[in-house]
Amino acid sequence: MSKKSYKDIQENVVEVALRLSAEKGWSSLSIADIAYEMDMSRSEMNLYFYDKDDILYALGKFIDSRVMAAEIDIDAPVKDRLFEILMERFDVINEYRDGIKSIISSFKCSPKSLIFSFPHIGKSMAMMLEACGENVDGIRGAIKIAGLSGIYLNCVRVWIDDETPDMSKTMACLDKSLGRAEMMVNKFGI
């Protein structure tokens, strides 16, 4: 029997944490609960994650790697490429819907976790822009990253309540938001 790699174990921990988050609620969940479910000691868990904020960071990387594995039509207009890649992101998080909704809900009680997640959201959006062929360097790049981060977070709010099987409300929000952003980019030459 082969040993699992460090990355494989981290991904397993993230998936177990999401499942437990859906069952118990993220706020009620402890690292010890996750360690127990993984059949690990607390000290062994520390080799992978010190706290739940570490798990959130790994979750972001896990989502990013899944999204980046998707094929993007690089010849499509930028708005269409961004729509495609962000909907891929929503498809990924939708697989873990209840766990992620529990995490988002917990931010009301734990603003520290929300604050720690902001830099990762920016990095993720920079990666999404780059995957779509957009330059993210300099002030223009920072504006694009900030704008796409705002669009994504706004659409996450819609996604939370979107119970449609095809996420049509989320898609409509994303399409409308990207359309407004496209007008701003064209107007101001960003």
Image (cartoon, rainbow, N blue to C red):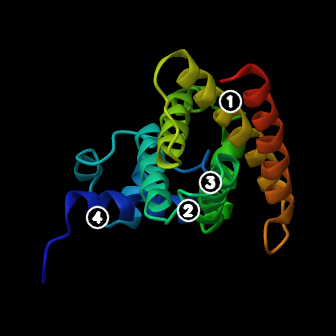
Closer to the N terminus: mark 4 or mark 1? 4
Closer to the N terminus: mark 2 or mark 1? 2
Closer to the N terminus: mark 1 or mark 3? 3
Q: Position of residue 5 (x, y in %)?
A: 19, 64
**Picture residue at 67% right of the left edge, 41% below the top:** 106
Mark 3 and mark 2 in contact? Answer it, CB < 8 Å.
Answer: yes
Kind of residue at disc 1: Gly
**Picture residue at 46% right of the left edge, 64% below the top:** 15
Kind of residue at disc 4: Asp
Q: Give the farthest residue toward the bottom.
A: 1
Closer to the eye: label 1 or 3: 3
Give the secondary structure at mark 4: helix
Kind of residue at disc 2: Asp
Give the secondary structure at mark 1: helix
Residue at numbered disc 3: 81
Q: Position of residue 102 (x, y in %)?
A: 67, 52
Residue at numbered disc 4: 8
How far apart are the alpha carbons under marks 4 and 2? Answer: 29 Å
Residue at numbered disc 1: 147
Closer to the eye: label 4 or 3: 3
Closer to the eye: label 2 or 1: 2
Crowd band around label 3 with a 10 angstrom C-alpha radius: few (<14), some (14–19), many (20+): many
How far apart are the alpha carbons under marks 1 and 3? Answer: 16 Å
Q: Position of residue 44 (x, y in %)?
A: 23, 52
Closer to the eye: label 4 or 1: 1
Asked which quadrant contains residue 80, the reply is bottom right
Residue at numbered disc 2: 73
Give the secondary structure at mark 3: helix
